Amino acid sequence: MMHGLSRGTRRALKRSMRRKRASELNIVSMIDILTVLIFFLLVNSIGVSILGVNLPSDSSTPPKEPPRALSVVILHDKLILGDRGGAIKAFPNTATGYDLAALNQLLAQVKDRTPDETKITLLLEPNIPYDSLVQVMDAVRTTRSTDGRQDLDLFPEISLGDAPNYAPTSP
């Protein structure tokens, strides 16, 4: 391509091509950097609230009593309602299923004594059917009002975990 040109002309063309390459900007990498920068600035301008973390203020007082830490252990043969003090009551699993009405009634009594408590933990034994988990979640989340017209919140903030190892009960 450059065979018919003089030596000086070829050098001049090569210099101009070098200058042209050096003056080109890589726009793609600049856009990538700007995208990351904009995302970083947006997240930092919103602060911690994007993560749903509510940090206490300096003026807040610590709670007088620790939370009850209610939990329902779902085993194949029974449900165990407990708190920090240990087991409160066990509900056997019969041929018709767990006694969820009795669990719901007891949780309503617990809610009457501690109306500010909204959290409960469900601890599952391995291989618990999904349907059983959903039924227990429904039983701990809400209850019917005394007139039966509306649902009242019991413990709507539900956490899940693994059940501790219990020794099998003898028949």
Image: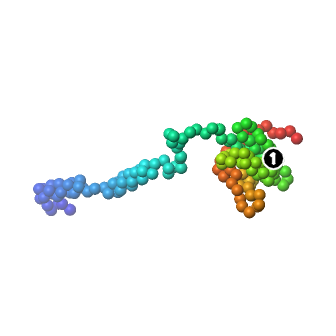
Tell me the SS state at disc 1. Answer: strand
Horizontal and vertical percent for residue 91? 81, 46
> Is 129 situated left or right of 64 in this image?
right
Q: From the viewer's perspective, is 93 left or right of 157?
A: right
Q: How many marks?
A: 1
Q: Is residue 84 visible?
A: yes
Give the colour scheme shown.
Answer: rainbow
Q: Is residue 124 above or below residue 84?
A: below
Q: Residue at x 36, y 54 (%)?
A: 34
- Residue 54 spot, x, y in % from top left: 53, 46
Q: Nearer the viewer, residue 20 or 41?
A: 41
Q: Quadrant of the N terminus?
A: bottom left
Residue 105 in percent (x, y) is at 78, 51
Identified at 54% across, 41% down, the residue is 60
Q: Nearer the viewer, residue 86 or 169?
A: 86
Query: Would residue 130 be visible to someone looking at this image?
Result: no
Give amino acid for label 1: Phe
Depth check: 49 or 59 in front? 59
Res. 152 image quadrant: bottom right
Which one is in front, 146 or 42?
146
Residue located beneath label 1 in the image: 91
Quarter holding the C terminus is top right
Indicate the position of residue 149 as horizontal and vertical percent values.
Answer: 74, 63
Residue drawn at the location 51% of the way across and 42% of the way down: 57
Residue at the limit of the structure toward the right, as seen here:
171
